[in-house]
Image (cartoon, rainbow, N blue to C red):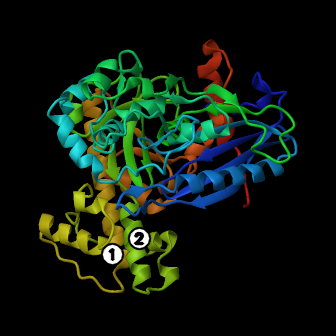
Amino acid sequence: MTQTPDYASFPTHKDRRALVAIDLGAESCRVSLLHWRKGSPSIQLIARIPNAPYTDAAGNLRWPFRKLETQLHSALQSAVAAAPEGIRSIGVDGWAVDYVRLNAAGQPLEDPFCYRDERTVAAKNSLDTKLTPVEIFKRTGVQPMRINTLYQLVADHMADNQARRWLLLPEYLLHSLGAEPVAEFTNATHTGLVDTATRDWSPDLFARANLSIVSAPQIVKPGTIVGRLRQDICHPPVRSETMLIAPACHDTASAIAAMQSEVNDSAYLICGTWSIVGARLLHPVMADEARQRGFTNLGAADGAFCFHTNINGMWMLKQCVEQWQAEGRAAERLEFGALAKAAEAVRLPAEAIFPVDAPELLLPSGMPQKILYLLRADTGIRLSESPDDEAVITRLILNSLAHRYARAIRELEELSGRRYARIEVLGGGARNALLLQLIARSTGCSVTAGAVEASTLGNFALQLTAGVSAADRAVALRQAVQLCGQAQWEAS
């Protein structure tokens, strides 16, 4: 590992203003502030805003994004107040595929649909007759899932609503702060409409799906300066111009950018609501076998590709906890740390594994019962459910996830033609010692705990390298990642 650089090694080292990272999450949205303390970064969490989709009067599943926008603007005001030195830049990352439709004045027409809304079932079935998943993967390298922006736009077209301009959610929030309307490359690749050869929108895919390409925003590279903060956002206004930066606007790409591993044989595992297992590759893997095995090729922060597969994650345990809470079980037993500790003492048969990717596990309610049913159906093993079984079900979930991760690593190696001796775990799972042990045992790999708030660190690192020349950017990004990885997190 190279020595952690001092901020003085950066071309922008004379600018000691703070940076703001906004992370949009499906469960919470965070606003964080990076200060400089004697040349070293210190990060302060300014706000954590709860988030969840809601069902509108017509039965559609939507995000309360107009409300979130107001709350995020207010949190930004708090960040400005906490940084008397001023704000150098603001970057936004978040989840992919969902978008805001804009009116002629650039304002949201309505709250955006949530990717879980079932309107895309009919849209995908319709498009599959004209543009097959095989054709889409061959052009884009992206797994053709019904949640993708492509199928959401087709659903809009079927509802006669496709002529309106649209922006993906992180880029829309930047636009609300004063940025140009753009689509950042890593986020754009998730739409299923970017050609891997040209790294731009595919006119052919737009045409064959009967979509308007003129409604799509211009694609820009990660780390692009896309505007300046509107002076009317903050009261009193910031003292000097604040840059608006599109980092890697997709939170996964920002998280992967924050990896500390420098060796070429390292895979990544992002463990949160979803699990993402893969590796950064210079070139996409376009073989149809990759599509059949559920792998996808998405933009990386440095212009390469993140080749990975999505797997169910801690969503299952969270759903179990919510049910147990509703049943009135003791709150102190239901904290994730307490559940993991209790699960350490549980011993289950090696074959007690359930299929974590089962479709019914992607839907809420009745999660413990679903898990136990799948275990019985798949293995014949029966486990009783009682108020004392939280530890057993937690251990069952962790064992099954580790088993699934091992299969994903084997498939990753087969498809990429590379061996991976190390896995860096990012996200909330990085602080679950039992899960890390189980992953190491299942995969035979060396497992290291990476950053929990990896998306925030990657966001800040990409802001630090904005404006650095292309020739120096790769080295600067690696230095910025190392620097941000050493940041002290201030108590909230």
Nearer-the-camera pick, 184 or 443: 184
Q: Position of residue 307 (x, y in %)?
A: 36, 32
Quarter in which the N terminus is drawn: top right
Relative horizontal placement of residue 406, taking residue 345 as reference (left or right): left
Residue at 24% from the left image edge and 32% from the top image edge: 414
Q: Of helix, strand and loop, which one carries label 2?
A: helix
In the image, 121 versus 365, the foreground residue is 121
Where does the image place residue 53, in percent across and percent down from the top left? 44, 59
Dot 1, crowdedness within 10 Å: few (<14), some or many (≥20)?
A: many
Picture layout, residue 256 above or below residue 336:
above
Please tell me whether residue 189 is drawn above or below residue 401 in the rendered image.
above
Relative to 330, 491 lies left or right: right
Residue 392 is marked as 1
Please tell me the numbered disc located at residue 344.
2
The amino acid at mark 1 is Val
Task: Identify the mark nearer the N-term, 1 or 2.
Answer: 2
Q: Amino acid at mark 2?
A: Glu
CA–CA distance in space, label 1 to label 2: 10 Å
